[in-house]
Image (cartoon, helix red, strand yellow):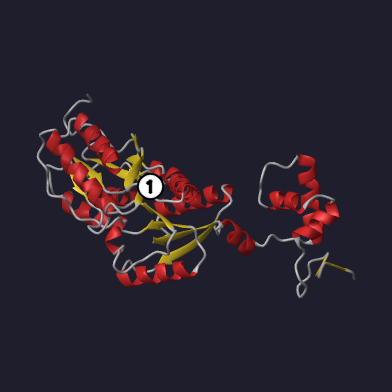
Amino acid sequence: MGTVSGGTRSGRPGRQSVSIGDVARAVGVSAQTVSRVANGRDNVNAATRERVLGAMRRLGYRPNSAARALRQGRFQTIGVILFRLTATGKSATVEAITTQAAAEGYAITLIPIEVPSQDHMLGAFTRMNELAVDAVIVFIETHLLDAAVVELPPGVHVVVVDSDADDRYRVIDSDQAGGTAAAVDHLLGLGHATIWHVTGPETSFAARRRSRAWRAALEASGRPVPPPVAGDWTAAGGYAAGQALADRPDCTAVFAANDQTALGLLRAFAEHGLAVPDRVSVVGFDDLPESAYFTPPLTTVRQDFPEVGRRSVREVLRQIRDGAAPPPGTEVIPTRLMIRESTAPPPGQAPM
């Protein structure tokens, strides 16, 4: 079988790959035109583009991404470092990151962290340093981002998601405070004297933001602030909290740190014969796909996880294009209160 400039038209293993020049000669166009098509440029007419693509397939041409990275100074890859991919919000956000990055011509390198510790964090960044990435999106609490320990390669841009960045990096986050205030105001508007709160873990930035916003909303309304009940994001944690709150006759409304916590509360209250919402109202946070099918359907704060993912990609690409990081700060994605059947006025009070 004949060869083409040291390669093969079939592109079989063991032979040198087909070059841009081979494709250009086969189609009768310049190498620059083939390069434009290979790089997805739009300054090639449709008929020529189809002829070039057809020749690429026929000859087995594969663009050399490493060489392209050297020419452009970019690797067209975004690193994502995160803990607990199985969490519903993170998985939805990462899916959106992957989709948006692909639409922009970028690939994703995902590095999960098994344990949220400084050592594991250092290992993840060490691994990321060995890879060819243009930017990093981080889903890690920033108390683990110790600048004295973790150092990124020069020129790698960073966006932090759903956390605080200590004025070092750009942050993309849902409106934790606004969503919480909407939940508290909704329950107070129904006539509840105050709102109890089952928290997320103390180490979580989002949980702390929601707890602070809950307290601030009650104080702004001149209402008493009950002692928060510790939770851990899980239904089991919510169930344990519900067992404690079920014995309190003054508890007529609960704001749960997330929907899984709310699910545990619903189970505990049902076991104690406390009807939701006739005896106690419950509000969650996240709006998981299953939340509308809880018994009763859950009133909750919806986070737009896909938009957080899309904005994260857009932000790192903007940094790449500008060649520098923007001033530190937070871009807030709006949340929305979804009112369903788990909230009502307190016992003995007519609807307002």
Location of the C terminus by quadrant is top left
- Residue 77 point in image, percent of width and height: 53, 58
Is residue 299 something that shows in the picture?
no
- Residue 297 point in image, percent of width and height: 36, 40
Residue name at image x 18 percent, y 37 percent: 217
Q: Residues within 10 Å of mark 1 (few under 14, many from 20)?
A: some
- Residue 281 point in image, percent of width and height: 24, 39
Residue name at image x 44 percent, y 50 percent: 93
Residue placed furthest toward the right: 1
Residue placed furthest toward the top: 352
Between 183 and 327, the one lying in front of the other is 327
Q: Which residue is mark 1?
A: 326
Disc tally is: 1
Is residue 249 something that shows in the picture?
yes
Between 174 and 313, the one lying in front of the other is 313
Between 234 and 10, the one lying in front of the other is 10
Left or right: where 306 falls relative to 239: right
Left or right: where 135 falls relative to 120: right
Residue placed furthest toward the bottom: 14
Quadrant in the picture for residue 15: bottom right
What amino acid does circle 1 point to?
Answer: Pro
Quadrant in the picture for residue 181: top left
- Residue 317 point in image, percent of width and height: 49, 49
Left or right: where 51 falls relative to 309: right
Residue name at image x 39 percent, y 72 percent: 123
Location of the N terminus by quadrant is bottom right
Q: Secondary structure at mark 1?
A: loop
Picture layout, residue 177 above or below residue 9:
above
Picture layout, residue 193 above or below residue 273:
above
